[in-house]
Image (cartoon, rainbow, N blue to C red):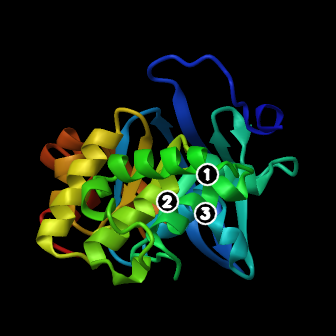
Amino acid sequence: METAVLGAGKPKTSKETALKAEDFSVFYGSFEAVKSVSMEITEKDVVAIIGPSGCGKSTFLRCINRINDLVPECHTKGNLFFHEKDIFSRDVDVNVLRKRIGMVFQKPNPFPKTIFENVAFGPRLHGIRRRSALEEIVENSLRQSALWDEVKDRLDQNALGLSGGQQQRLCLARTLAVEPEIVLMDEPTSALDPKATLKIEDLIASLSEKYTIVIVTHNMQQAARISEKTAFFYEGSLIEYGPTKNLFTTPTKKQTEDYITGRFG
């Protein structure tokens, strides 16, 4: 059961710790891509992870719902807790974990199915079969992702016919359909135009009332606009982590200052 595996059903305070890394490292073979990271993420925060290419930020993000399990020779050291359960414990059901910690990737990846079937896929996988229940979930998820009004009259059309921005919002709706607690976003707007990017950013602000959101972004202006806290990674290490305003205006580390002022990137 989910309760036994990952602590579901526990009474929550408004700012309970959702994720906690303790000396957490990630290796690809002998290469240490993430080096002894320790940080906490509280519920319903929007946390941005920034840093230059190859600094370990996406690797760290993909460990949170164990997508990196699919990468050959990838292994971890230390602890990564979801609430108070180490997600790498042997008794963790990875399918349950990925239901409770959803992910939106850099490039939109809708299934070659109808819009309806894309959103209904997860709920069906987890045992919901009744058509009326699926219809309600699909509508609610598309509303949360600000897509319902654009697609409500063509739910039976192939999702691949949507624009790039619409496809990314559909992928977000597909993630929300299984009612996760945490939404991970790996460069979710890098392939989108400015108008579609703004829609995703507006969505992040509204969704943070219900979900914890962790977003990897190369766009420092985006991090400053949407996040409450920011983590700066460099060469696999967490250099600085704290309130976004403080990190961008009064960084405590010279490496952080050099990065945000454009001295390297």
Q: Residues within 10 Å of mark 3 (few under 14, many from 20)?
A: some
Q: Nearer the viewer, residue 264 or 126?
A: 126
At 27% from the left edge and 78% from the top edge, which residue is drawn?
A: 163
Image-based side of 72 in relation to 59, left or right:
right
On the image, numbered disc 1 is attached to which residue? 131
Q: Earlier in the sequence, mark 1 or mark 2?
A: 1
Residue positioned most to the right:
91
Q: Earlier in the sequence, mark 3 or mark 2?
A: 3
At 56% from the left edge and 40% from the top edge, which residue is drawn?
A: 19
Mark 3–mark 2 CB contact (< 8 Å): yes
User: Whole-Å distance between the Cαs marked 3 and 2?
Assistant: 8 Å
Q: Nearer the viewer, residue 72 or 127?
A: 127
Decide: is 195 above or below 245.
below
Q: Secondary structure at mark 2?
A: helix
Could you say where residue 88 lies in the image, as x and y percent from the top left? 76, 53
Picture quarter containing residue 66?
Answer: bottom right
User: Whole-Å distance between the Cαs marked 3 and 1?
Assistant: 12 Å
Amino acid at circle 1: Arg
Amino acid at circle 3: Phe
Q: Nearer the viewer, residue 170 or 229?
A: 170
On the image, numbered disc 3 is attached to which residue? 121
Q: Residues within 10 Å of mark 2 (few under 14, many from 20)?
A: many
Amino acid at circle 2: Arg
Could you say where residue 245 lies in the image, as x and y percent from the top left? 18, 41
Residue 174 badge: 2
Note whether residue 180 is visible: yes
Task: Give the quadrant of the C terminus.
Answer: bottom left
Could you say where residue 198 lies in the image, as x and y percent from the top left? 16, 60
